[in-house]
Image (cartoon, grey):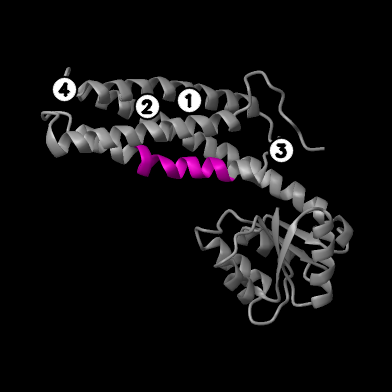
């Protein structure tokens, strides 16, 4: 996991870098909120651990800026302070959307890595299940869209394309069944550990659908009523080949992601 530590104290940054590094994390550092925002423009991280009082931009302002940007609205953000730990400070942090507000007096530095692991995996698991539902809806749309395109293709004029679309419908049925099995395996288990890499893979799949499947299907649908000749036939065939490759790729990724039916879920200790 990649963690950004934001603190104006160099000794504290060094200490947290060493402790998080010992726990197997890659650590980036920034001395204030403004520097953190600049760093995030070019570096992706899985979590931010921030002090509150800092020059130029403090932790509250940093958290607010991140939550107002869609790129970082769901990024794990953890306040870690030994000074601003009163009720009002913690309430403000929660209202800004912080994942957690940790009191350094109660969570010493040698325990911070474990706390971050727990918080990030809990957040990833919740987002994973939300994304899984959205992906399932998107794939159901793609499956039904395939069926409409298939029914619109003229018999005889688009034999190869019809075969491809029909095969894709069967593949999408299999993909949906696997996603349903994954949802069933996770149902009622909010403490299931989902690696961040799996969440990112799921997001990529969701983003993949429009460009690689739905848009090419629109091309096929547009040419479905005309004669399968010339440039229109080429465009339809190219679109069908692209959709076939995309569905195969999604099937491969879902096979590696989804738990086999009946498999036990893994819970964090």
Q: Which mark is residue 193?
A: 3
Magenta segment: 200-213
Callout 3 touching callout 2 (CB < 8 Å): no
Please tell me whether mark 4 sits on a helix, a strand or a loop. loop
How far apart are labels 3 and 1 at the CA level?
22 Å
Is 95 drawn above or below residue 148 in the view shown?
below
How far apart are labels 4 and 3 at the CA level?
50 Å
Classify mark 1: residues with Cα within 10 Å, few (<14), some (14-19) or many (20+): some
How far apart are labels 4 and 1 at the CA level?
30 Å
Q: Is residue 201 magenta?
A: yes
Magenta segment's dominant SS is helix
> Label 2 belongs to which residue?
143
Please tell me whether mark 3 sits on a helix, a strand or a loop. loop
Is 120 drawn above or below residue 185 in the view shown?
below
Say which residue appears at 60% left-offset and 70% top-offset.
39
In this rendering, position of residue 227 left or right of residue 251: left
Tell me which label, 2 or 4, sits earlier in the chain.
Answer: 2
Place of residue 109 in the rendered image (x, y in percent of width and height, measured from the top left): 86, 62
Place of residue 157 in the rendered image (x, y in percent of width and height, measured from the top left): 16, 22
> Label 1 belongs to which residue?
176
Please tell me whether mark 1 sits on a helix, a strand or a loop. helix
In this rendering, position of residue 261 left or right of residue 50: left
> Label 4 belongs to which residue?
157
Considering every residue shown, the one lying at the far bottom of the view is: 56
How far apart are labels 3 and 2 at the CA level?
30 Å
How far apart are labels 1 and 2 at the CA level?
9 Å
Tell me which label, 3 or 2, sits earlier in the chain.
Answer: 2
């Amino acid at each position: 996991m990649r963690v950004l530590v934001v603190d104006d104290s160099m000794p504290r940054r060094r200490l947290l870098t060493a402790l998080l590094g010992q726990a197997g994390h890659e650590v980036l550092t920034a001395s204030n909120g403004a520097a953190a925002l600049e760093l995030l423009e070019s570096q992706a991280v899985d979590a931010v651990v921030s002090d509150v009082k800092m020059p130029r931009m403090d932790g509250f302002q940093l958290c607010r800026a991140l939550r107002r940007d869609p790129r970082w609205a769901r990024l794990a953000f953890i306040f870690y302070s030994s000074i601003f730990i009163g009720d009002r400070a913690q309430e403000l942090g929660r209202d800004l959307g912080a994942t957690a507000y940790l009191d350094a007096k109660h969570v010493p530095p040698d325990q911070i890595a474990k706390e971050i692991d727990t918080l990030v995996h809990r957040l990833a698991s919740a987002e994973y299940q939300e994304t899984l539902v959205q992906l399932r809806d998107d794939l159901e749309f793609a499956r039904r869209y395939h069926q409409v395109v298939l029914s619109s293709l003229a018999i005889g004029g688009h034999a190869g394309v019809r075969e491809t679309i029909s095969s894709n419908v069967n593949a999408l049925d299999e993909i949906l069944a696997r996603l349903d099995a994954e949802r069933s395996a996770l149902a009622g288990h909010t403490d299931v550990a989902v690696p961040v890499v799996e969440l990112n893979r799921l997001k990529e799949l969701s983003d993949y659908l429009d460009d690689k499947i739905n848009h090419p299907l629109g091309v096929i649908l547009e040419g479905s009523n005309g004669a399968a000749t010339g440039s229109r036939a080429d465009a339809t065939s190219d679109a069908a080949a692209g959709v076939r490759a995309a569905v195969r790729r999604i099937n491969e990724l879902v096979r590696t992601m989804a738990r086999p039916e009946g498999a036990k879920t893994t819970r964090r200790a």
